[in-house]
Image (spheres, helix red, strand yellow):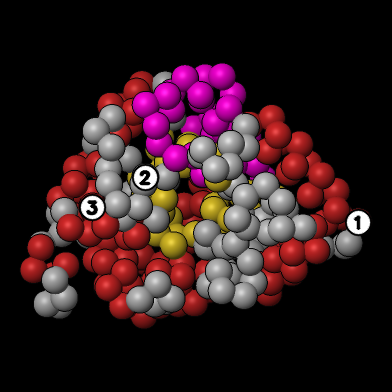
Amino acid sequence: MIDIHCHILPGIDDGASQYEDSMNMAKKAIEEGITTIIATPHHNHHFPNHGLEIENHVARLNEKLKENHIEIEVIQGQEPRITADFIEELNRGEILTLGNQRKYVHIELPSNQVPRHTKSIIFELQLMGITPIIVHPERNTKLTENPDLLFELVNEGALTQVTAASVVGNFGKNIQKFSYQIIEHNLSHFIASDAHNISNRSFHLRGAYEAIEKKFGIKKRYELQENPALLINGESITASTPEPIKRRKILGLF
């Protein structure tokens, strides 16, 4: 398995605090069956984490993993908060695309809103040949209240990534229900850990894929599990036709 969203780099955001934590996270990932991790430290006003700094941190972590005979690969990435300056920061190299390909980039929305410039940035990225991936939309209260907006963003070319812990219920039943609805209506294209540690914010990828297979079948699991490999190879991912979520289902009337 490939994990496209993980805070494994030590000491630069609210994830691993030191190399020992990174080593423990890597070992836990291997236990889950993960072979490759895209390191995605935050990029926001609390944690600036510019592109070149992240590249250097990733290189050093891979050295440490090799020294400790931990067989897992870490690839550079980032979790940048969307701002009006997003495109400029990307062009300056402050924001990184995912992996060694300039084809996909994460976008983090504020937890309770979708900024007005979101759609225009999605459009501009696509003109540059870069596909945006909105991370953890299931935890955005604006999208929960207005699922039609999520459909619009995906219909206009954005991809999304649901957190594994949300699928297995670690963020509560309401977020779990919304996660299932997002997946059912083809509004998510990736499952990723967003792991920060091995205690309260661990990986849960295997459990999430098993839950998805049980609820939606092996085909959906295969699609979501294979898309990360396509991403790191710079290929087009598999995406079924998005469908709007009926509001009555958001209210829990399944």
Res. 78 mark: none
Residue situated in front as seen by the camera: 221 or 77:
77
How many residues crowd mark 3 within 10 Å: few (<14), some (14–19), many (20+)?
some
Report, in whole angstroms, how far the alpha carbon at label 2 lies from the one at label 3.
Answer: 10 Å
Outermost residue, right direction?
Answer: 67
Q: What residue type is labelled 2?
A: Leu
Local secondary structure at mark 2 = loop
Q: Can residue 81 be seen in this view?
A: yes
Residue situated in front as seen by the camera: 198 or 32:
198
**Residue at 51% across / 38% down in the picture?**
45
Q: Position of residue 114 (x, y in %)?
A: 27, 43
**Residue at 28% across / 37% down in the picture?**
115
Tell how many labels. 3
Q: Magenta: predominant secondary structure element?
A: loop
Mark 2 — residue? 109
Q: Position of residue 162 (x, y in %)?
A: 40, 59
Could you say which quadrant of the image residue 130 lies in? top left
How many residues crowd mark 1 within 10 Å: few (<14), some (14–19), many (20+)?
few
Looking at the rendering, the stretch of residues picked out in magenta corresponds to 75-103
